[in-house]
Amino acid sequence: MRSQRTKAITITLSVTITLLCVLPLFAAPSDDRTTRSGKARVITDMTGRQVRVPDPLPRVALFGGPTGQVAYALGAQRQLCAVTASLKGSELIGSFDPLVKKLPAPRTTSGHVNMEELLIADAQLVIAGSLDGSIVEKKTRIPVAYTESTMAHGYDLLKEEVRFYGNVFQKQARAERYIRYLEKTIAYLRARTEGIPKDRRKMVFNGYGPSHLVTLGGDTFMHERIDVAGCVDAVAGISTAGAKEGLHSGLAEMSMERVLGWNPDIVVIDTGEPADVYKDPKWKSVKAVQTRRVFKQPVGAFVWDRPTVEAGVLYPLWLAKLAYPERFSDLDMIKEIKTFYREIMSFELSNAQAQKVLDGKFSINYGIAGRR
């Protein structure tokens, strides 16, 4: 009887100690978290909210698959304590930063955040979009800085975002260096393509998924990327506003009849290979198929169909080179990719790695669900 009573007391004490250890993680006031170093500063997030954070800020949880690479562009990756699964699962990022594989990835896809993993990461700040950020605020006391959750993510917003991250990580000089690189690239492309008459500009259709009929609409960031490359966006008049079951925001599924009507000069796919499209009888009358102008979307730190620091620079260069080889005969995409990664990401790519980016062969592990 005495041994049973002793065992019961031991179990009770064990449960009590566990609860005392865990509960403060959920209930700790934000002031305690942000002043443990004795100093604090106030940052303004992308929605205009002011957030109090410690100074310095060594433990940031950065959510959002495409935006995670900005930490590398700013040289702030050692300030990350938690990331999204797709950043951790980026083959290219992992090849240059094996430590990212050891970071917890409490966020997989939008709306899926593992609170236990986040709390174990002991984040002093979470940077997230509206859905993930609201979940964190409801369930913890960790301060949240919101990014602008929109697929209408033009270059002006990209520059604003990079400056926001520069302020958070106190890497303002690196942020401005990227912005200068971006602006120089845009100016170069504009100058090279401005003389092309409107009726001779190449029409581009981004056809994603197994059917190659899912696309980014004319109200998304992709419209501006195509325009900067001197091309015409086939879906310029297509709005993708509103939620669509099974599709990421900004995406919509087109009919084959619509694509046939547009008859694009260039088709960009992200699934399968161009040879598959060439053999598909449904596509045989499309100009891009008849002229063998179907191309696989490149994949680097992330796939190039998202509004990232990487794709913002490299996607329009790649597209312009494909569309107007005679105007860009001196543009070497292998060299451009290597230069970008060296100067912006501090990665030294080999020629083989740069070619692998162009061929869309680097893998991304997105976590529990696919990107679409």
Image (cartoon, rainbow, N blue to C red):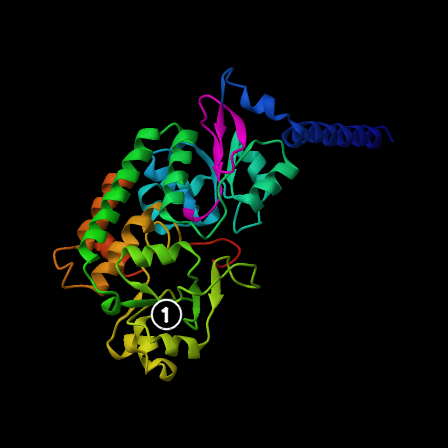
* 96 is higher (above) or lower (below) than 125: below
- Residue extending furthest toward the right: 1
- Residue extending furthest toward the bottom: 281
Q: Residue at x 38, y 38 (%)?
A: 162
* 172 is higher (above) or lower (below) than 103: above
- Decide whether residue 46 is among the magenta residues: yes
Observer able to see residue 223: yes
- Decide whether residue 90 is among the magenta residues: no
Mark 1 residue type: Gly
Label 1 sits on residue: 272
Question: Residue 245 appears in which quarter of the rendering?
Answer: bottom right
Q: Is residue 336 left or right of residue 61?
A: left
Q: Is residue 12 left or right of residue 204?
A: right
Question: Residue 160 appears in which quarter of the rendering?
Answer: top left
Binning the other alpha carbons within 10 Å of mark 1 as few (below 14), some (14 to 19) or many (20 upward) gives some
Q: Residue at x 56, y 59 (%)?
A: 242
Give coordinates of residue 321: x percent, y percent.
Answer: 21, 60
Q: Of 47 and 31, which appears nearest the observer?
A: 47
User: Which residues lie in the magenta part?
Assistant: 42-66
Q: Residue at x 65, y 32 (%)?
A: 26
Observer able to see residue 304: no
Give coordinates of residue 211: x percent, y percent.
Answer: 43, 73
Q: Residue at x 32, y 72 (%)?
A: 264
Disc 1, SS = loop
Q: Is residue 351 left or right of residue 144?
A: left
Give coordinates of residue 88: x percent, y percent.
Answer: 43, 46
Q: Of 227 and 362, which appears nearest the observer?
A: 227
Q: Quadrant of the N terminus?
A: top right
Give coordinates of residue 114: x percent, y percent.
Answer: 58, 44
